[in-house]
Image (cartoon, grey):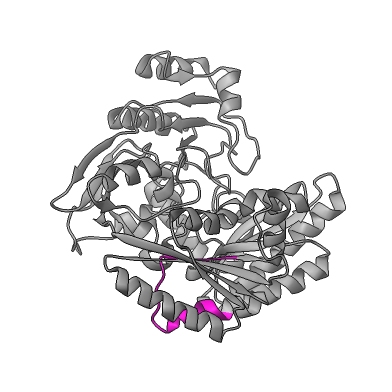
Amino acid sequence: MDKKHEKFFIKLLGEDNAYFDEAHKIAYCYDATRKRYAPDGVVFPRDESDVSEILKYCNEHKITIIPRGAGSGFTGGALASSGGIIMALEKHMNKILEIDLENMVAVVQPGVINKDLQKEVEKLGLFYPPDPASETYSTLGGNVSENSGGMRAAKYGITKDYVMALRAVLPNGDVIRAGKRTIKDVAGFNIVGILIASEGALAVITEITLKLISKPKFSKTAMGVFPSVESAMNAVFKTMAAGVTPVAMEFLDNLSIKAVEERFARGLPTSAGAILVSEMDGNDESVINADLERLKEHFIANGASEFKVAKDASESSDIWFARRNCSQAINCYGSLKINEDITVPRSKLPALLEKIAEISAKYNVITPCFGHTGDGNVHTNVMVDKNDPEAVKRGHEAITEIFKATVELGGTLSGEHGIGISKAPFMSLAFSEAEMNLFRAIKKAFDPNNILNPNKMGL
């Protein structure tokens, strides 16, 4: 980084908001992938005007800029893999600007923590449903940029279903507003839709208008125990096809169950092939109870050996414990976790899990699986010894075959983690060259000088 550029950013932002020292480069060189790419500097814009001036200068001088929220992504989307400056939005642009009760919307800056918004709107009897596992630390700007999902997606959908409007700054510094605070809006191209899941490669989001809904009064949790993964997966899609729509339908396979039990000793049935954890909510307790009865009928009809409904919040927390803690527990199977968040149509879940088992046996790897089966999203975790190069090689080969199998079943490379750099090599499996060229053309239309988060998403 030329010293004249450093001086510009320090003059614009002040010495406490523009850093080019080693400590800040180290602090912002990694994300949840644990890969490391040192940036040339880190800047903290105070407002949209700062974002505009930073981008205008970077565009003029061809300086790479990478927007960043909490850095909790699993695919390297916020890493300076091509060098450049990290634009960190969590320090200043982290305010809830408005909660509009009459229109049931919230207006927030991109650095607001997901869970903080949930808490604030729930005080007013409202509800923001998207709940990624990282909800206590991930930012809403990052959620929009990755189109994050979560456990409640089976009933309530994902981030894209709640974004009504955005303010954003283009790479040349121009400020745009996409979308409106209206339920209906069909004027012009759907720029909001293009910016959602764009991973910071098209524009820097500076303000988000989110739809809110009424907070359900009641919720109940249930757990089904199944003899096999196949029977559990059949129960998922057959239950939902029959018109039962739970808030969440989460699963753990046998390897995940054993890992949780080994680490936490929670009394889980380690002989079970799979567990399904489900939750129902609504404003009428009798309707919830009726839905739970229907859920039980479908679970039993598809082979469940046990069905338990939590009696209170404490039992509900106990049931959810295994699902919420299985990700850390499965580290008992290996020091390196190659985890992916593949998604298929729900009816293809049995075939997908069967294929994953075949591939794991072929490459001699252990692959515990868990995830959001209510929306067809499976977290696949190939576990290997990071100090064994041959095992690591087999692990990556297994993941490649799992991706191929997913696409062949009509699925996608990512349900919520995004593409970034980790999945970039696999984009050609899921998209034709014509489609990839269209993505590149969209990128060029927004960012002709390719300064904004370049070389991500296989572009």
Give the vertical position of 430 relative to 178 (above or below): below
Which range is magenta? 234-251
Q: Nearer the viewer, residue 196 or 350?
A: 350
Give the vertical position of 225 relative to 302 (above or below): above
Q: Is residue 59 left or right of residue 35?
A: left
Q: Nearer the viewer, residue 124 or 413?
A: 124
Residue found at x 33% / y 43%: 119
Query: Looking at the figure, which quarter contains the N terminus?
Result: top right
Residue found at x 50% / y 34%: 64
Residue found at x 46% / y 78%: 295
Occupied quadrant, residue 61: top left
- Residue 181 is situated, as x and y percent measured from the top left of the image, at 18, 53
Q: Is residue 40 left or right of residue 115?
A: right
Q: Is residue 165 visible?
A: no
Q: Is residue 200 left or right of residue 29?
A: left
- Residue reaching furthest to the left: 102
Q: Is residue 178 left or right of residue 386?
A: left
Occupied quadrant, residue 322: bottom right
Based on the picture, tell me whether residue 291 belongs to the magenta stretch.
no
Give the vertical position of 21 relative to 105 (above or below): above
